[in-house]
Amino acid sequence: MALAVIYYNLFSALLFIIGVYCLATRRSLVKQIIGIEIMVNAAHLNFVALASRAPGGIDPYAQSFIILSLGVGAAVIALALLLSVQVYRTYRTMDLAKLRRLRR
């Protein structure tokens, strides 16, 4: 069982690295939102994997925390996508470099 937790942690670290890579290299606003969501899901996976090592089985508080976090995260991502659609309608671009130039 402890060996499986290591695999989950490694997969979680890989997902987190993919999310950071997506944030660092992509210029599109939607792709960066997807990168943030990948990083949040990697943190959820790591939290559940570590909670499974609790004595007496899986900790129900950890699972309830993750379910609550998924709900709040879904609302935040929906709001971010809504804002990105409004940015596209206003400025006709999703490129962050062009959007940063509009500030000046």
Image (tube, grey):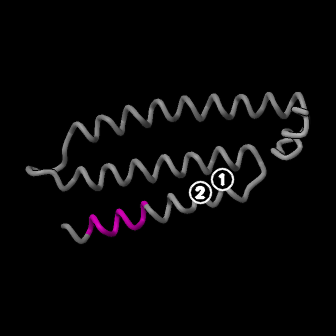
Name the quadrant of the N terminus.
bottom left
Dot 1: what SS?
helix
| Residue 93 versus residue 1 in the image, above or below | above
Q: Is residue 45 magenta?
A: no
Tag on residue 20?
A: 2
| Element type where label 2 sits in the image | helix
* Three-letter code for the amino acid on which mark 2 is drawn: Val
- Kindly identify the amino acid type of the residue bearing the numbered disc 1: Leu
Task: Using residue 39 as the reference point, say whether residue 12 is left or right of it.
Answer: left
Q: Tags 2 and 1 in contact by the CB under 8 Å rule?
A: yes
Q: Please report the residue visible at 68 percent of the width from the left and 34 percent of the height from the top.
A: 81
Which stretch is magenta? Answer: 4-12
- Residue 21 image offset from top left, x and y in percent: 63, 61
Q: Quadrant of residue 10?
A: bottom left
Q: Is residue 93 above or below residue 51?
A: above
Q: Residues within 10 Å of mark 1 (few under 14, many from 20)?
A: some
Q: Residue at x 84, y 39 (%)?
A: 100
The quarter holding residue 33 reads top right
Residue 20, image x, y percentages = 59, 57
Residue 16 percent location from the top left of the image = 50, 58
For residue 23, which numbered disc appears in the image? 1
